[in-house]
Image (spheres, rainbow, N blue to C red):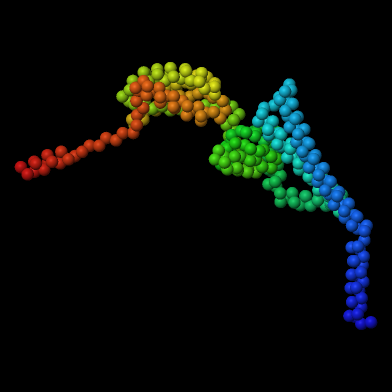
Amino acid sequence: MTEAEKAVDDAKTKWDELVEYMTDSELWFQVAAGAIRIALILLVSFLIIRIARRVITQFFANKRRGPFRITERREATLNKLVLNTLTYVVYFMAFIMILETFNFKVGALLAGAGVAGLAIGFGAQNLVRDIISGFFIIFEDQFSVGDYIQTSGVEGFVEEVGLRTTKVKAWTGEVHILPNGNVTQVTNFSMHNSIAVVDVSIAYEEDIEAAEKVIQELLGELPERYESMLNIPELLGIQTLGASDVVMRIICEVNPMEHWAIARVIRKEVKNRLDAEGIEIPFPRMVMYSRDEEANDSSVVKES
């Protein structure tokens, strides 16, 4: 038998073995069983996550009525964090079970992953730093979901605090995703009451004491109209002497993040009251001198 004939016979034999293997009913039974098992694993994982979400949400809802209450901002942060962590754990376990379905030796795989993790860890220092920073952000309650913060050149409302990243939404709609390791210095505007600061300009020609009296009377009326004002706004006095105006400063303690809205309200109320009392709020002025008459006089002198 020649080499060519021998190769043809070997190929025919392998083809027959492949056809016999593919037509084996036991093989297809194992494939079908494996597919059903994978589908069941995914379905059970989905149901576990759905049920766990409801249980966790109900747990925090009951926490509000219990003796050991937590703030809403803290509750929203922990709620999302627990849900995200649970989702990662369930999907990881589902992935391991699917590998076992394909007869992978998971124990050896995890042992190898542990050894490889040591090598990868040196290249994943930023990831480890982000996770550790995220833990301390949550543990120390530096900020929570719903807080308005400023950090790393970003300012906005916190949408989500995770173990690795933090999502901050600007008031114009942009969502900034910051690695927790980059959150080094944070300014939180939502933890304590805010102070609304308003500067009011009065013309030099007006009676300053009369203007102060009018403004004081108005400020005493405002807390009854605006619930966000925690006390009567205070007129501190003359702040600066401008080029064409006397600037008075008003401050008011308000609920967190209400200082911008209340400042706009105070400006409107003060403007309307000063107009009603005939007290002028100055506007920029420009005085121009004409030299035409002086030029004409000098020309006459020269001609004479």
- 203 is higher (above) or lower (below) than 184: above
Q: Is residue 70 above or below residue 106?
A: above
Image check: 33 left or right of 60? right
Percent of width and height locating residue 269:
44, 24
At 38% from the left edge and 27% from the top edge, which residue is drawn?
Answer: 201
Query: Picture coordinates of residue 71 (x, y %)?
Result: 67, 27
Question: Who is closer to the viewer here, 261 or 256?
Answer: 261
Q: Nearer the viewer, residue 57 or 114?
A: 57
Measured from the top left, where is residue 135 in percent x and y? 70, 37
Is residue 58 visible in the rendered image? The answer is yes
Spot the residue most to the right. 1
Give the residue at x 75% y 51%: 120
In the rendered view, does 168 fall on the left or right side of 40? left
In the picture, the quarter occupied by the C terminus is: top left
Is 130 in front, or is 218?
218
Q: Position of residue 16 (x, y in %)?
A: 92, 69
Q: Quadrant of residue 157?
A: top right
Residue 12: which quarter of the image?
Answer: bottom right
Q: Is residue 76 left or right of residue 246?
A: right
The quadrant of the image that shows the N terminus is bottom right
- Look at 12% across and 39% down and name the residue there: 297
Residue furthest left in the image: 304
